[in-house]
Image (cartoon, rainbow, N blue to C red):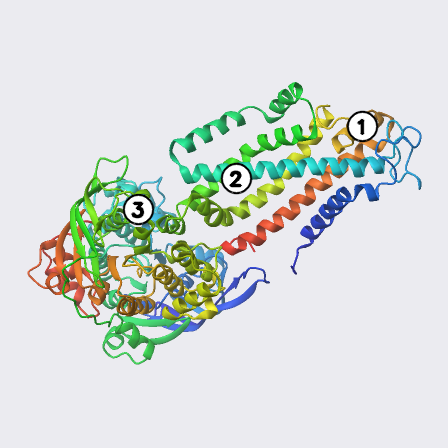
Amino acid sequence: MKNIPVSALIGLFFTALYFLGAIFAPLLAPYGVGEVVGDVWEPASAEFLLGTDNIGRDLLTRMIYGGQTTIFIATAATVLSFTTGSILGFIAAEAGGWLDQAMSRFVDLIMSIPTLIFALVVLSVMPVTIPTLIVVMGLLDSTRVYRLARAVAVDIEVMDYVEAARLRGEKTTWIIFREILPNALSPLVAEMGLRFIFAVLFVSTLSFLGLGVQPPAADWGGIVKENKDGIVYGIPAALIPAFAIATLAISVNLVADWVLNRTTSLKGGRG
Amino acid sequence: MSDTLLKVRDLKIGATIYPPGEKPKDIEIVHGVSFDLAPGKVLGLIGESGAGKSTIGLASMAYGRGGVRITGGEVWVNGRDILKTGLRDVRKLRGGEVTYVSQSAAASFNPAKKIMDQVVEAAVEQKKFSRKEAEERARTLFAKLGLPDPDNIGERYPHQVSGGQLQRCMTALALCPEPDLVVFDEPTTALDVTTQIDVLMAIKEAIRDTGVAALYITHDLAVVAQVSDDIMVLKMGNTVEYGSVDQIINNPQEEYTQALVSVRSIEHEEKAPTPDPVLSVRNITARYKGTQFDVLHNVNVDLYPGQTLAVVGESGSGKSTLARVITGLLPPREGEIEFAGRTLSPDLKGRSREDLRELQMIYQMADVAMNPRQTVGTIIGRPLEFYFGMRGGEKRKRIIELLDEIELGEKFMDRYPAELSGGQKQRVCIARSLAAKPKMIICDEVTSALDPLVADGILKLLLDLQKIEDVAYLFITHDLATVRAISDNIAVMYQGKVQRYGGKSKVLSPPFDDYTDLLLSSVPEMKLGWLEEVIANRKMESAGN
């Protein structure tokens, strides 16, 4: 673990900071999440480190709980999209023929509809709860993972060691999980970082539009929405969650980049 | 101007390597090599992979490939040190005074441009000739190199000519600007033996007629003996021996050179067929899905227990397809396969685990035949687990036994394939197939990606293991020296048919049919003047022409 480049260290630091903040939210937050503790849009002070929001709740508390919601939804959606996307992609590559064609064309069909519009339509007819959000986001995102996983697996599938496993009589599950998956992991991990960021942006967008996390629960996109009117009066409350989203995006990317660099060096890739 | 065209003194070449998880390291790959080359002479650079022969060849154009740097020494071309003259001068040198012929013409030609455009490009660019003169010269060279229809072949695209022809076009490309020196980097290695011989002859005549000097790089001593005046033997970036062809071939001084000269010294007594073959291929006709063309026509061969059947032929003769049919990867259109007294299902899915276990396969490219994310222990252990249900200590013991059998030992158990050399990788693949305790192993060109000395070791190992394990080999190869070394029976394949089949002594002794004669006579021999002799006595043109 030595020789970690500075960029990766910065990325690791911020990623860890946000994730720890999310995990230990109830311990860290000075006030309750929906608790009105001061005046509207109070400036930062010793009492309220980041000031208060549009109805006088402590912004730091909102940010910590908001981070928890945002990161939890994004993580769960990413995990969901990765498991479904990559397993289906591997199956398609391994099976080939009509099954591959049917699945790939179906995915093309889904991908031809803009994701945000699709999600808005689905969420406007369904009750907006956190599980629904996760499932909708995860399944929509899994189409992209499917494409990548299938492309990578098709390349691996023609390798002699896969043929050797097939000649040995191995079952499809062994071939997928023991021969293909370990060799497909590094591009998938890199993609996972990116997809996680897209999930964060996506859930923030939905909340900003009012179809994501519902009040009084906090999330970063929602905090921007609640406080956006303050910008006109020179109150920075809406910029704080925006800043958090941006730094999380950058730092997760830095980490993913580093992981990719490390793992591809096995194949003689970049140093 | 002095009478040496190329003078290399104490040439040192370095590179930076990037070991995973460690800091980049600078290493030296050529340690002070010196030689001279007079105008019109040919120097052969020979050595195994990693000997630095290509690197030295490129250094004579002041070029280092992919992060390789020339760190010391002098390279004099036509009386000036090209390592010191600066980029502008070097640009005039490359493609003008010194030109290069690479191993794979197919990968070196731009597929989107006509051959003529590429052949004359350097000559015109260097302002040696006008476009018209250069084209005229190219056509003369095409004729000299024995290309068909020399007046019009330049109008074709690279994919419209055969591999052997393209390699000759590249020689024309290198000779077109009237260079003083041509660097040939393994120009015939990727070709079939019967094609190689024509290209060799063409190159040799072109060198003689144009009076150009050449560096000829190859790993095949028999080939270099045919074309060069002097030979330099290299090993790990050091000169092992440097002398005239005659001296190197007939009177090698160093132990390493002697080993190279006497390679393929394996003797194997032919065994008589036993009554019950382990494998009988009956009237197999096969074609690939979606094509209208039979790759195999009515193939019949037998393989006896504990013996070796060599299937020989050029690329495209159907020998690997035969292996795919036997393994069940390609169900045949007609015919059947009997294995160990039972008829095998034509399709892989219909075969029992016992069928699969008893019929194993070893691949040509050991690198891609092993999962790079599994350790040697896992790779060898999996068949034990899968077929015999071995676990824990019992499995470990058997893995160590197998590692000992392939002469590697226990310490290799936790290594990954990337940490093994080419020969070691192939040994692990052998152990993996032996782990299944098979009755028969299909060896698909298992030694062709290896250096001659390493390949020799693998062949010896295979023969020893055959005695211990009593396993039969179906040995697919294009290399007749290998066939001579290990087989009991031979099937010569040509265009999907078995041309000649029988015991080794019968197949390899006259009277020959025309194809077998061509194939046998095309294998380079380590003898001066062999090339001219063969060309003079040929009965049949090779298919690559």
The image position of residue B358, as x and y in percent, is 30, 56
The image position of residue B28, as x and y in percent, is 49, 69
Residue type at mark 2 is Ser
For label 1, the SS is: loop
Q: Is there any visible trace of residue B64 in the rendered image?
A: no
Outermost residue, bottom side:
B253
* C-alpha span from label 2 to label 3: 30 Å
* C-alpha span from label 3 to label 1: 63 Å
In this rendering, would B496 be left or right of B459?
Answer: left
For label 2, the SS is: helix
Identify which residue, B491 or A23, lies in the foreground: A23
Pick whichever of labels 1 and 2 is earlier in the sequence. 2
Q: Is there any visible trace of residue B417 in the rendered image?
A: yes
The N terminus of chain B, quarter of image: bottom left
The image position of residue B161, as x and y in percent, is 25, 44
The image position of residue B313, as x and y in percent, is 20, 54
Residue, disc 2:
A86
In this rendering, would A138 be left or right of B12?
Answer: right
Residue type at mark 3 is Arg
Identify which residue, B425 or B428, lies in the foreground: B428
Please tell me if label 3 and label 1 are on a single chain: no
Q: Residue at x 49, y 60 (%)?
A: B86
Identify which residue, B449 or B529, lies in the foreground: B449
For label 3, the SS is: loop
In this rendering, would A58 be left or right of B374?
Answer: right
